[in-house]
Image (cartoon, rainbow, N blue to C red):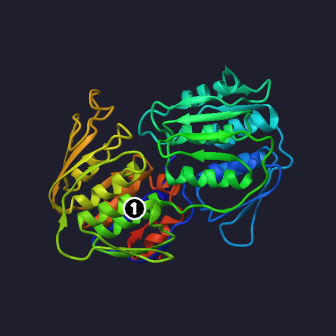
Amino acid sequence: VNGADDVLLVHGGTPLEGEIRVRGAKNLVPNELVAALLGSAPSRLRNVPDIRDVRVVRGLLQLHGVTVRPGEEPGELVLDPTHVESANVADIDAHAGSSRIPILFCGPLLHRLGHAFIPGLGGCDIGGRPIDFHFDVLRQFGAKIEKRADGQYLEAPQRLRGTKINLPYPSVGATEQVLLTAVLAEGVTELSNAAVEPEIEDLICVLQKMGAIIAMDTDRTIRVTGVDELGGYTHRALSDRLEAASWASAALATEGNVYVRGAQQRSMMTFLNTFRKVGGAFEIDDEGIRFWHPGGRLKSIALETDVHPGFQTDWQQPLVVALTQATGLSIVHETVYESRLGFTSALNQMGAHIQLYRECLGGSDCRFGQRNFLHSAVVSGPTKLEGADLVIPDLRGGFSYLIAALAAQGTSRVHGIDLINRGYENFMDKLVELGAKVELPGKALG
């Protein structure tokens, strides 16, 4: 239900300037909170952002008897899992809403309670979600799964056992599922073609702190030797490199200068190389990274998204907005999500020249090449962007629309900004701090 609260008026054409902070990664913090369920002692997680996914996990943990309270510093949570218990099905359903997070509770709950329940699942509509894959993996560990009208019931008649798993595609969600299940399973689990994103590595660090034995090989193989018991952890979550790159792209598209406190070079190296090739400037210090448009013309590039260590798919949409301001033809080949270029039609409506193609352009062939998806884009620039009426399709696309509206001349009405709230902490406050001219109709901001 979208009320007037869900519309943002953006008066574009002002460079973004100032400083904002990014906290722990949206795609990581929920998993590290779930990991606390595996321990027999309390855990402490720092750098936790206040976003919807975190609130959902927190609620689900509390439903299962985990006490969650704020720690001493802002963004710190203390989790005590000593009294884990079964939660009521209706409560789980009501609490999870459309989130996909309950799927990650399966392994830990099977270890702690011997059973788990998963309601029907949702998430951003950007392509197929391999939920069945999670269930297949859990079956391989020895779980019994029964589909009922209101969701899936899982049982572990005996202790789960380690297994050999080969991922058809290095999916982050599937890799997390395997890790959270394998650490307490009996024997060795070998996961080949695993995702090796920095967020995965950070989750492994948390699990190792708890007492897990996990080896990461350079060939995308992860080996987990199960242990009988895990303790708690104390950890500062890795900052959100996807959000950091969104603000970097916003600085570039609006000819601004933004210091992103919390941005980390190591997890962003591929993005930083591309940012520099396009003509953006950055400077790194111990606390964060400053991104700015150094003046002069931006350069067109050929870009292909890929799993880590490639160029992340979540970096693509915000950067495409900046590419509309580059001189020449840029080619973007999306190989991770088949329908992630749909957002470009709104940019065209604002004056961009972006054409989509079914072929794999600008490099290697990918798994979408023979399958009728518009998954390559040619961006010709520079083009002036004009304000427009925009309806946000999904989280990253939404932030890209926002960047386009900020870079455009004139006023845009951006509908559906609640979607951005899902993954970007206090993004309205951050916009105001950077001098953006934005207003919620009927409310004053900044």
Q: Which residue is mark 1?
A: 269
| Residue 24 placement (x, y as % from top left) | 57, 61
Residue farthest to the left?
328
Q: Nearer the viewer, residue 371 or 148?
A: 371
Residue 321 is left or right of residue 145, and the answer is left
Tally of marks: 1
Using the image, determine if residue 15 lies above or below residue 331. Answer: below
Residue 392 visible here: no
Q: Amino acid at mark 1?
A: Met
**Would you place residue 161 above or below residue 439 in this image?**
above
How packed mark 1 is, by other alpha carbons closer than 10 Å (few <14, some 14-19, many 20 or more), is some
Vertical relation: 334 (above or below) 315: above
**Left or right: where does residue 267 sit relative to residue 273?**
right
Direction from residue 40 to residue 314 in the image, left or right? left
In terms of depth relative to the viewer, which is nearer, 151 or 181?
181
Task: Quadrant for residue 338, please give it.
Answer: top left
From the viewer's perspective, is residue 351 above or below residue 362?
below
Q: Residue 272: in sight, yes or no?
A: yes
| Residue depicted at 72% across the width and 29% down the height | 161
Percent position of residue 374, x then y: 27, 36
In percent of the image, x 40 and y 46: which residue is there?
393
Residue 35 x %, y %: 69, 48
Q: Residue 28's spot in the image, x, y percent? A: 57, 53
In this view, the residue farthest toward the right is: 83
Q: Secondary structure at mark 1?
A: helix
- Residues 25 and 286: in front is 286
At a point 23% along the width and 45% down the height, the residue shown is: 377
